[in-house]
Amino acid sequence: MTDPVSSIRNLGPASDISFARAGIRSADELREMGADEAYRRLLAAGSRPHFIGYYAMVMGLQGRPWNDCKGKEKDELRARFDAIKSEASANTPLKDKMEAILDEIGVRSR
């Protein structure tokens, strides 16, 4: 049996659902692909970008508590996060961006 994504430190049961939507179904898959690729897949699957979620995952993959990220290390992770977020935005079709905005402000029915 494989361990769920939520078996990784800092990742809770809701992570299992989000990662599964991105095609990542086990802790081993997540470890193998690494944090940056996993986060790219999460964004491509519709997860909203959130820096704390990103660095909590990075820290968890290292076996560290989420709040262990500080100073220069945190600044470097922020730069990686911003690059991944920018890349994901550039790869999202305009129609999908518009639909996401309409959903966010509650104009479309769900």
Image (cartoon, rainbow, N blue to C red):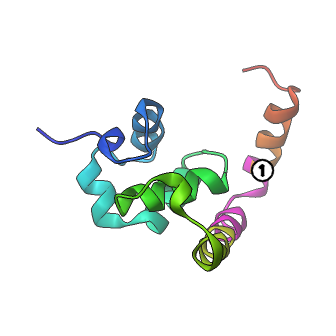
Seen from this angle, which residue lies furthest left? Answer: 1
Q: Position of residue 105 (x, y in %)?
A: 88, 32
Is the residue 42 above or below the residue 58 in the image? above
Is the residue 42 above or below the residue 103 in the image? below
* Quadrant occupied by the N terminus: top left
Q: Is residue 85 magenta?
A: yes
Q: Position of residue 97 (x, y in %)?
A: 77, 50
Res 44 visible: no
Seen from this angle, which residue lies furthest top? Answer: 109
Residue 12 sits in quarter: top left
Q: Amino acid at mark 1?
A: Lys
Total count of labels? 1
Q: Is residue 72 magenta?
A: no
Residue 85 sits in quarter: bottom right
**Which residue range is magenta in the image?**
84-96
Is the residue 6 above or below the residue 34 in the image? above
Q: Residue at x 54, y 47 (%)?
A: 45
Q: Which residue is mark 1?
A: 97
Is the residue 83 above or below the residue 37 in the image? below
Q: Main secondary structure of the magenta part?
A: helix
Q: Position of residue 82 (x, y in %)?
A: 69, 70
Q: Position of residue 16 (x, y in %)?
A: 39, 36
10 Å neighbourhood of mark 1: few (<14), some, or many (≥20)? few
Between 90 and 55, the one lying in front of the other is: 55
Q: Give SS at disc 1.
A: helix
Between 95 and 51, the one lying in front of the other is: 51
Q: Residue at x 16, y 42 (%)?
A: 2
Residue 84 sits in quarter: bottom right
Q: Residue at x 86, y 26 (%)?
A: 106
